[in-house]
Image (cartoon, rainbow, N blue to C red):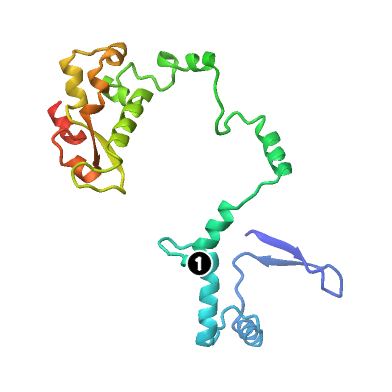
C-alpha cells in the first residue's frame, strides 16, 4: 500500500518522520474532539450566520455591484456615469507613444493594410478558401462597393424611411423592385465584367427602402426567391 511521508516542523522533539497510510480514517473520539474545537472557532465556515435584513440587503447590493448578471438593467445614473467616463477619456501622449511602439511589430493589428502583391498572392485560386469558383454571381455582386453605394443612394433618396409602413427608426433593407437575379437572367449576364457594365443592375429607381418585416412580405424576398430559382 502507498504511504505518504511528512515531517512536522512544530514538533519539539525534532523533525520526526511519521507515516500515514492513504485512506486513513479518524476514530470517533478524534472526530468528536475536532467537532468541539470547530464549534469554538469563530471562523467556522459551516456555521450559519444570523444576519439582520439590513445586512442581507447590504451584502446583496454589494454583490450586484461587482457581478454582471445577464439581463440586469443598470440604473440611469450608473449609465450616465459610464457614458461620461467613456466619452471623456483622454489618453496621454506618453500612453499613445507606448501603444504605437507595441503595435509596430504586430501584423494582426486593426487597420493593417496588405500590399497589392500580397493581395494577388492570396486571391482567387491561390486563396485557401477557394472551392472551385462555386460562389454564384448574384451573391458575389452583393459584396462589392458599387452595390453598397447603390444601397446607400436608395436609403438617402427615401430619407431612411420604410416606404410601406413609414417606420424611420429601425434596420432597413434596400429592396429590388425587379429582382436582382431576374435582371441577371434577362440580360444574360454570366461574368463579373458584364454585370459591372449593366446599367439596369445599378439603377436607383429600381430600389426602395423597406424595414425587415415589410421586406419579408415581398414576393422576391431571399427565402421565396430561392424556391423560384
Residue 41 percent across, percent down from the top left: 66, 84
Q: Quadrant of the C terminus?
A: top left
Q: 17 or 220: which is nearer to us?
A: 220
Q: Secondary structure at mark 1?
A: helix
Residue farthest to the right, as pictured: 13
Q: Nearer the viewer, residue 220 or 157?
A: 157
Please determine whether, in this image, residue 73 is positioned above or below residue 227: below
Which percent across, then down, holds residue 190? 24, 12
How many numbered marks are there? 1
Q: Nearer the viewer, residue 127 or 210?
A: 210
Q: Is residue 115 left or right of residue 92?
A: left
27 horizontally vs 52: left or right:
right
Task: Establish if 136 lies above or below 156.
Answer: above
Residue at figure coordinates x 55%, y 18% from the top left? 115
Residue at x-position 60% and y-position 73%: 25
Write down the residue under mark 1.
Answer: 77
In the rendering, at what x and y percent does residue 222 appear? Answer: 21, 34
State the image quarter where residue 51 is shown: bottom right
Does residue 78 appear left or right of residue 32 in this picture? left
Q: Residue at x 21, y 25 (%)?
A: 180
Q: Is residue 222 above or below residue 122?
A: below
* Quadrant location of the N terminus in the rendered image: bottom right
Amino acid at each position: 500500500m502507498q504511504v505518504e511521508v511528512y515531517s512536522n516542523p512544530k514538533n519539539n522533539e525534532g523533525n520526526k518522520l511519521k507515516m500515514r497510510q492513504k485512506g486513513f480514517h479518524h476514530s470517533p473520539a478524534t472526530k468528536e474532539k475536532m467537532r468541539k474545537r470547530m464549534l469554538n472557532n469563530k471562523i467556522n465556515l459551516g456555521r450559519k450566520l444570523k444576519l439582520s435584513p439590513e445586512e442581507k440587503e447590504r451584502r446583496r447590493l454589494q454583490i450586484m455591484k461587482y457581478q454582471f448578471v445577464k439581463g440586469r438593467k443598470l440604473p440611469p445614473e450608473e449609465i450616465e456615469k459610464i457614458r461620461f467616463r467613456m466619452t471623456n477619456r483622454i489618453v496621454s501622449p506618453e500612453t499613445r507613444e507606448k501603444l504605437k511602439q507595441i503595435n509596430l511589430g504586430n501584423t494582426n493589428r486593426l487597420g493593417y493594410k496588405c500590399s497589392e502583391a500580397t493581395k494577388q498572392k492570396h486571391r482567387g485560386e491561390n486563396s485557401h478558401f477557394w472551392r472551385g469558383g462555386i460562389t454564384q454571381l448574384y451573391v458575389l455582386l452583393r459584396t462589392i462597393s458599387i452595390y453598397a453605394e447603390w444601397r446607400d443612394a436608395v436609403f438617402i433618396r427615401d430619407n431612411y424611411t420604410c416606404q410601406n409602413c413609414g417606420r424611420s427608426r429601425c434596420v432597413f433593407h434596400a429592396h429590388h423592385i425587379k429582382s436582382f437575379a431576374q435582371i441577371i437572367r434577362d440580360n444574360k449576364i454570366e461574368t463579373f465584367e458584364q454585370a459591372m457594365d449593366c446599367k439596369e443592375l445599378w439603377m436607383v429607381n429600381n430600389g426602395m427602402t423597406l424595414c425587415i418585416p415589410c421586406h419579408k412580405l415581398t414576393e422576391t424576398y431571399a427565402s421565396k426567391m430561392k424556391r423560384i430559382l
